[in-house]
Image (cartoon, rainbow, N blue to C red):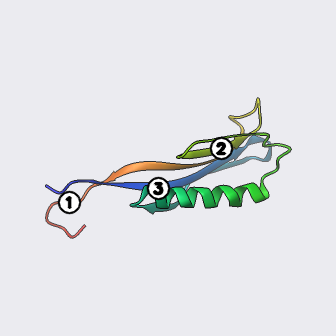
Amino acid sequence: MPKPREIYTVVTTSADADQGCFQEPTPAGSYFSFQGAQAELARLIEEEKETLDTARYDTEEWNDTVWYAYQEGYAAACFVRIEVITSLLMDEEGTDG
């Protein structure tokens, strides 16, 4: 039986209740390498920071798998989140993948 492989998907999502915007989770890419996913995460964070309204998104937190910015006291209704999600990729027996 083939061994499952880990795959790392970078996903973005956001919400801004005041503007009526509720982005569904959107994949930005999948990688077999955790380092590749982290590089994409870093690139997307820098891209997001260029356009982020720092007057509204006044707090940010991050670690090696997730970054999010939000409005203090209003985090559930005004946020941007980019994260790396780990999944298992299963090969079906008798197929090429």
Residue located beneath label 2 in the image: 68
Viewer-proximal residue among 17 and 12: 12
Residue sticking out furthest to the right:
55
Residue 61, quarter of picture: top right
The answer to whether residue 46 is visible is yes
10 Å neighbourhood of mark 1: few (<14), some, or many (≥20)?
Answer: few
Q: Which residue is drawn at the image coordinates 13% and 55% (left, top)?
A: 1
Checking the image for residue 9, the label placed there is 3
Q: Secondary structure at mark 3?
A: strand
Q: Amino acid at mark 1?
A: Glu
Left or right: 18 as drawn, with respect to 46? right
Q: Which residue is drawn at the image coordinates 80% and 42% (left, top)?
A: 18
Image coords of residue 66 (percent x, y) = 57, 45
Where 7 sits versus 59, above or below? below
Counting residues from the start of the chain, the first of labels 1 and 3 encountered is: 3
Q: Amino acid at mark 3?
A: Thr
Pointer 3 and pointer 2: residues touching (CB < 8 Å)?
no
Residue 96, quarter of picture: bottom left
Tag nearer the camera, 2 or 1: 2
Q: Secondary structure at mark 2?
A: strand
Left or right: 19 as drawn, with respect to 93? right
Image coords of residue 46 (percent x, y) = 69, 58
Q: CA distance from mark 1 to mark 3?
A: 21 Å
Viewer-proximal residue among 46 and 51: 46
Where 82 sits versus 44, above or below? above
10 Å neighbourhood of mark 3: few (<14), some, or many (≥20)?
Answer: many
Residue located beneath label 1 in the image: 92
- How many labels sit on residues? 3
Residue sticking out furthest to the top:
73
Counting residues from the start of the chain, the first of labels 3 and 2 encountered is: 3
